[in-house]
Amino acid sequence: MKFDLKCSVQLSRKADEMEEELEEFIKKIEMEADFKWKIEGDKILMEIVSDKKRSHEIILQIYKKIAKFFGMHKIGLRQIYIDEYKIEFEVEKKPLEKIEIPFAEVEINERIVLIKIKDKGEEFIRQNYVDRIIRRIREKIEKQYYEGKKEYWNLLWKSSEKKHVWNKDPSEEMQKRGWIKLIGKGKWFYFPPSAEIMRAMEKIALNEVVLPLGFKEVIQPMHVSFETWMKTGHLEGMPGEIYYICEPKSREIKEWEKFVDLLKIKREVDEKELLKNLKTPKAGICYAQCPNIYTALAGKTIAEDSLPILLFDRSTPSDRYEAGGKHGIERVDEFHRIEIVYIGTKEQLINIKEKLIEKYRHVFEDILDLEWRMAKVTPFYLQQAGIAGGEEDEVEGTVDFEAYLPYRGDRSKEWLEIQNISIVGEKYIKAFNIKSQKSILWSGCSGIGLERWMVAFLAQKGVEPDKWPNEFKKYLNKLPEMPEFL
Ligand code: ATP
Ligand code: ZN
Ligand code: MG
């Protein structure tokens, strides 16, 4: 790498006469780079060229020393000003496309990247923007290589083929019967029959999996702060899938008067006036339930006796701005999940994962009687980062549970992910600074998608309770009637 920093510092008065004395002073400073400087009136101009230590780090040390020197002569120093900072570094792979980044010009020549940063204040160096710009460029190049590639998928287990009672699309059928109604983009209203089916799924998950394994319920806010999502990575990972929340600037009726006037006169919302009354978002609606659980545990030291920590949430729906592929109740913008979170030693987590798989298997085989399968999945970017290589016996990573949807036909590919089990190692433990007395902690979560369980079940077993498996009928054997609409 090569760092070439041209910068200047404003002095409180002209100081050309100090040059010789300063030269003597600087000679005594041990320098790890090529350092040039001169005084020009009330300014000191500097250039630091280095191929090891970063010039922006060196300048901070030099600045401290010369501030002392000028201080002795009663001359004050303003902050460092970056006139031009050129950095050259090598990357592993040749970028496939042009790269752009805020704050810097980027030039690429095969595997050599040259960035140029101009006219910036001292904050820029102090806040470590430079290193982050370099890291982000490397990340963008990596991404060019894995974008569009499929995630790694490896079958772990598959149930036997089962006979299905029909091959209709349950969402369509429920809509025909009036059991579900679309209200807004990807958001459904569930009338009593469909609501009872979803609640039966929830009861099964709780009674057969979550509670017997010792998970305890929590209740969390539906709002998730940006700080939380910056720690989990959601804000950088899926900013385009979040439903953002705006607070009003004020709750005073007076402040909203014009908005109400316009509403009453135009009989529609005046968007400009509305936006004037809203703050910019600092939070969003729950995307997955685990981030707020980690936030609740942030900074805590967990007693050994309390390990593993086993919690679950079913209090808040999850909202996601889904693009294409929305269909019926299986890919929606608002869905209902039970999410369980486990924190413990690696051994404890291996044990929990085994027990979870055993319980889920019991539900899908013995109660819902589904045609389903389990696969180890690793998104390509994680394989790349070496976080999870996708080995079958590897603990970190995700297991997806999928069910076959007969109405879609082709048995070789029409499977829907209905839930997953993830173990993420120390990732979130570190991000949220959760500690134990002595053990190294790992964590993970498992999201049970109730709409997905429901769709899988109804797609295979139909919507007539008399055709449902007996074990399921123990949870629900009769549906409430729909009101009659004329
Ligand atoms: P996909 O690849 O299908 O978008 P995902 O990787 O985004 O899924 P996760 O974030 O792993 O899903 O969420 C875990 C579970 O949440 C899924 O197994 C599923 O049960 C449920 N889920 C996720 N997105 C939706 C959605 N849009 N509609 C209904 N359920 C969903
Ligand atoms: Zn989670
Ligand atoms: Mg998704």
Image (spheres, rainbow, N blue to C red):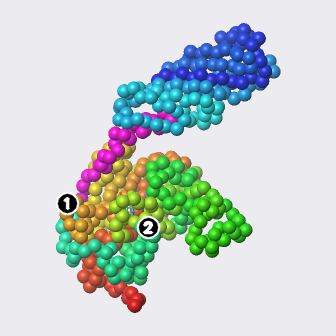
x and y, in percent, of residue 194 in the image: 38, 79
Q: Position of residue 68 (x, y in %)?
A: 74, 21
Q: Nearer the viewer, residue 14 or 375?
A: 14
Q: How many marks?
A: 2
In the displayed structure image, the side of residue 43 where residue 173 appears, left or right: left
For the residue labelled by badge 1, is the local secondary structure a helix, a strand or a loop? loop
Quarter residue 448 falls in:
bottom left
Q: Report which residue position mark 1 lands on.
A: 412
**Label 2 to label 1: alpha-carbon separation:** 31 Å
Instruction: Determine the residue positioned at 30% across, 70% down.
Output: 456
Relative to 463, 411 lies left or right: left
Identity, as a three-letter code, of the amino acid under mark 1: Ser
- From this viewpoint, which residue is outermost toward the front? 266
Range of the magenta residues? Answer: 131-157
330 lies left or right of 369:
right
The magenta stretch spans residue 151? yes
SS category of the residue bearing label 2: loop
Q: Label 2, on which residue? A: 185
